[in-house]
Image (tube, rainbow, N blue to C red):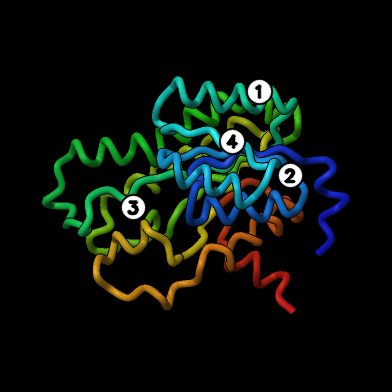
Amino acid sequence: MNFKEYRTAMSTALITGGSRGLGLALAGVLVDAGWDVITDGRDRPSLEEAARRLGPHLHSVPGDVTDPTHRQVLMNAARRLGRLDLLVNNAGTLGPSPLPRLRDVDPEVLVDVVRTNAAAPLALTQAALPLLEVSDGAVVNVTSDAAVEAYQGWGTYGASKAALEQVSNVLAVEVPGVRIWWFDPGDLRTEMHQAAFPGEDISDRPLPDTVAPALLVLLAMRPPSGRIRAADLLAKVAP
């Protein structure tokens, strides 16, 4: 697909959690497509390595997305670039590892996971909406099938992603001028997924780089707000 004409209209993205895994892969496909990408992460060395790897169009901002001051720094970075066309709320936490049964989870652990996986994305989206509304922009909230399916041990994480999906669903109604997509990339070979299965071989899961191009397909097709599976997008453009 030719994205040259499309990317002249949308050119600046903010992706949280871009120092590794899916966030890094998403940042990579956008930088390769000509975008400026702001990204953050709590691991400064990994974030610096990402910046070296992707070059000057990746603008790295170390910090934790649950911190209101850090979120303001991210928005200031977008304003310095002059616009914001896309927000990808990718940063998240698995919660306890190994995965505990929900009946055994301290409710305060659930509160912490929801704070990272649902409340922080909402707060950043609220801050970004004025810029996104001006640019006819979009929000991508990275979700999981654990939000809609019942998997033993995944109750804490799944509940937080279910909250994120309903936040997305309501925002889509309340803010019709901005596309809101909740994006399910499927199981991936990442550090987080490995933490969910400590000591197990997860090499059968696809690498994030194989799924990240689905974001370009999503941006090019620009469907109405809703739940989107990466596998479905990639199937539409498969030879």
Residue 177, image x and y in percent?
A: 70, 33
Q: In terms of secondary structure, where does tag 3 sit?
A: helix
Nearer the viewer's eye, disc 4 or disc 2?
A: 2
Residue 220, image x and y in percent?
A: 76, 54
**Label 2: how many residues lie within 10 Å, few (<14), some (14-19) or many (20+)?**
many
Between 233 and 80, the one nearer to me in the picture: 80
For marks 2 and 3 on the same chain, the one whose residue lies earlier in the sequence: 2
Residue at horizontal 24 percent and vertical 70 percent from the top: 199
Residue at horizontal 52 percent and vertical 60 percent from the top: 185
Spatial CA span between label 1 and label 4 = 16 Å
Nearer the viewer's eye, disc 4 or disc 3?
A: 3
Q: In terms of secondary structure, where does tag 4 sit?
A: helix
For marks 1 and 2 on the same chain, the one whose residue lies earlier in the sequence: 2
Give amino acid for label 2: Trp
Residue 118: name its quadrant: top left
Q: In terms of secondary structure, where does tag 1 sit?
A: helix
Count of residue discs: 4
Q: Which residue is mark 3?
A: 158
Spatial CA span between label 1 and label 3 = 30 Å
